[in-house]
Amino acid sequence: MWCQPACSLFLTRSLKLVWASLQRQRFHTAGSRYKSRTGAEHLWLTRHLRDPFVKAAKVESYRCRSAFKLLEMNERHQILRPGLRVLDCGAAPGAWSQVAVQRVNAAGTDPSAPVGFVLGVDLLHIFPLEGATFLCPADVTDPRTFRKIQELLPGGRADVILSDMAPNATGIRSLDHDRLISLCLSLLDMVPEVLHPRGTFLCKTWAGSQSHRLRKRLTEEFQNIRTVKPEASRKESSEVYLLATQYRGKPGGL
Ligand SMILES: C[S@@+](CC[C@H](N)C(=O)[O-])C[C@H]1O[C@@H](n2cnc3c(N)ncnc32)[C@H](O)[C@@H]1O
Ligand SMILES: *[C@@H]1O[C@H](CO)[C@@H](O)[C@H](O)[C@H]1NC(C)=O
C-alpha cells in the first residue's frame, strides 16, 4: 500500500463505489445495499460524492484531494515559482509533490523557465513521479534522513519546506494536537541546516493549546507568519496551516 490513511480512504472508497455501482447494475439491489451501510459510512459517502474537490481531483488526476489546498495557498501567497528547490515532508501519496513539480518546473516542462527541484519524504512508500525525487520510507525526524535530505538537495538547501505531515490520529483531539505540534517543532530543528535564508516554511497543524509554542518559534526565525485555512480544508476539521516566510537565516551562518 502506498497511500496514507486519508488519501487511501479517498482511493479505496472510490474503488468501493465503482464496485458497488457494478454490483447494482448486476443485481438491481441499490436500495438494500445502501441501507446496509452504517450511518457514519453513509454520511461520509454522501459528503464524498458531493465534494467538488474530490470530483476535481479525479478529473485533474491528482493523487489526493489535498492537492487543492496547496494550489489554493500557492495562488493566494505565491509560495512556489519556477527554479525553486522544494522539500515536501509527509509527501505520500504525492499530490503536493505533483503540484510542486508543476509550479517550480522540476520536470523542465517549460524550457524557457528555470528548472526547480522537488524532494518528497515519507514514512510510507510513494509511487514514482516524473520530476520528483522521493526518499521513502524515511522518518523526517531521524538524523539519518536529515543527512540524506542534505545530500539530495542541490546545494544542500531548499528554498521552500512544505509539511503536510500528520501522525496517525488516535481520535483524542488534544493528544493528536500535541503530537503534530511536536512533529512540526522537530522539523523546525532542521531548518537552520536545510532552509535557504529568506526561504519559506509551510506546515499543517491541528488547532489547540500548544499552537502558540510553534508560532513563537516561527516568529523568532521568520519575518512573517500567517495562519491559513484553505477552502479545500474541510470546515469541520481543526486543520490550519502556518505559513512562515522570509527566513532570517542560521544565526552566524550563511
Ligand atoms: C496528509 S498526508 C500527506 C498528503 C500529501 N501532502 C499529498 O498531498 O499527497 C500525511 C503524511 O505524513 C506522513 N508522516 C507522518 N509522520 C511522518 C514522519 N515523521 N516522517 C515522514 N512522514 C511522516 C504520513 O506517513 C502521511 O503519509
Ligand atoms: C500509520 O499507520 C500505518 C499503518 O499502521 C503505518 O504504516 C504508518 O507508518 C503510520 N504513520 C505514522 C505517521 O505513524
Image: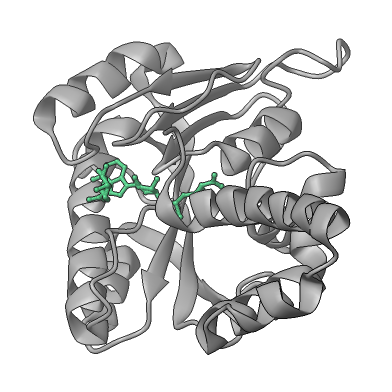
> In the rendering, at what x and y percent does residue 45 appear?
66, 73
Quadrant of the snapshot with the N terminus: top left
> In the rendering, at what x and y percent does residue 55 appear?
82, 59
Task: Indicate left or right for 210 with 34 as reference.
Answer: left
> In the rendering, at what x and y percent does residue 240 appear?
48, 75
Which color scheme does this rendered protein use? one colour
Q: Which of the two residues, 17 or 79, is positioned nearer the viewer here?
A: 17
Question: Which residue corresponds to the image point at 22% horizontal and 36% vertical from the top-left?
Answer: 139
Q: Quadrant of residue 116?
A: top right
Is residue 12 positioned above or below 88 on the image?
below
Question: Which residue corresponds to the image point at 65% horizontal and 15% vertical from the top-left?
Answer: 130
Seen from this angle, which residue lies furthest left? Answer: 143
Is residue 245 positioned above or below 40 on the image?
above
Question: Which residue corresponds to the image point at 82% horizontal and 19% vertical from the top-left?
Answer: 113
Task: Indicate left or right for 54 with 39 as reference.
Answer: right
Q: Which of the two residues, 9 or 33, is positioned nearer the viewer here?
A: 33
Q: Quadrant of residue 132?
A: top right
Looking at the image, how many numbered discs can be counted on the residues?
0
Q: Which of the two residues, 121 or 212, is positioned nearer the viewer here?
A: 121
> In the rendering, at what x and y percent does residue 245 appear?
50, 56
Question: Which residue corresponds to the image point at 65% horizontal and 83% vertical from the top-left?
Answer: 35
In this orientation, does residue 225 appear? no
Quadrant of the snapshot with the C terminus: top left
Task: Indicate left or right for 158 with 81 as reference.
Answer: left
